[in-house]
Image (tube, rainbow, N blue to C red):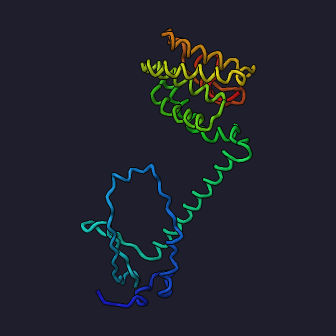
Amino acid sequence: MENLGESELLGDDGDEDVFAYNQLAFGRLRLAEDSNLPTQLYKHVQVRVTYKLETSPSKHVAYQIEFASVSRPFQTRYSSLERFHRHMSVIMKRIELIALYFDHILNGRDFKYRDSSTLKDFLIRDLREKYRSALRSELFEQALNNLMPILDLLEILELVCADRVTALTLICLCNAKSGQVDTAKMFSQKTLQFITSNSKIFSGKKYSSLISEAISVAGKVSSHSELNAYQVSSEMDDAGTPRSTISTTASFAEEI
């Protein structure tokens, strides 16, 4: 390779002179450390960067980045790397803004936004549709994979709502249907405890059918009673919204 000075090599798009090197704002890109990543599984990567002068389709510098001495080098132009870096900066900025936004929504103004049905629907809507679909096909273990994250989220946010009763009851029922007797019994107790500890909230008429059915299911699981009569299905409410049900009368999918 011809030995050229740096100013001669910086012929890439957007690199008008040697000072462009200092304009790449790597220092402003702060990649947050995630303590949950299994860093113990990774080895430290030794990075080596070289360059070569390309003449086709135009004269430019190609930077070759090696992540191991025996690996095939990754090749890029400076302008491509700069565009990548700018995209990464945008992503990191958005991450910061989203974190601030949800911190305000969940913790600001005396937590008044946290109990919003609009927020709750946004957070669990996709999972709700997935467990409904699984229940319609009687895929109880698949339904559990989507019910458990819903319950975890509602518990973390400390929300006392119909969706939480629904999740507890359906988890109880799905475990019973899947033959997971001990787990079903554990969730039957959790269902009854949650209803009891929030009896004032659930004493309203709008919760009556939901709570009645939840107690019935939890009681049958606890006492080893027959559960075959409970068929999980999907109905449409007056607004055309699908509802998961565990009987022909009690709806278990949405806050009334």
Residue in the picture at 50% in, 69% down: 85
**Could you tell me if residue 129 is visible in this image?**
no
The answer to whether 240 is drawn above or below residue 64 in the figure is above
- The quarter of the picture where residue 69 lies is bottom left
The answer to whether 238 is drawn above or below residue 21 in the figure is above
Residue in the picture at 64% in, 20% down: 196
Which corner quadrant holds the N terminus? bottom left
- The quarter of the picture where residue 28 lies is bottom right
Q: Is residue 97 left or right of residue 131?
A: right
**Could you tell me if residue 149 is visible in this image?**
yes
Q: Residue 211, how many percent across, how many down?
A: 65, 19
Residue in the picture at 56% in, 34% down: 150
Which corner quadrant holds the C terminus? top right
Q: Nearer the viewer, residue 205 or 137?
A: 205
Q: Residue 29, how many percent across, how many down?
A: 52, 67
Q: Is residue 199 left or right of residue 10?
A: right
Residue in the picture at 69% in, 40% down: 118
Q: Nearer the viewer, residue 88 or 234?
A: 88
- The quarter of the picture where residue 4 lies is bottom left
Q: Residue 71, how many percent across, how many down?
A: 27, 66
The answer to whether 157 is drawn above or below residue 186 in the figure is below
The answer to whether 194 is drawn above or below residue 62 in the figure is above
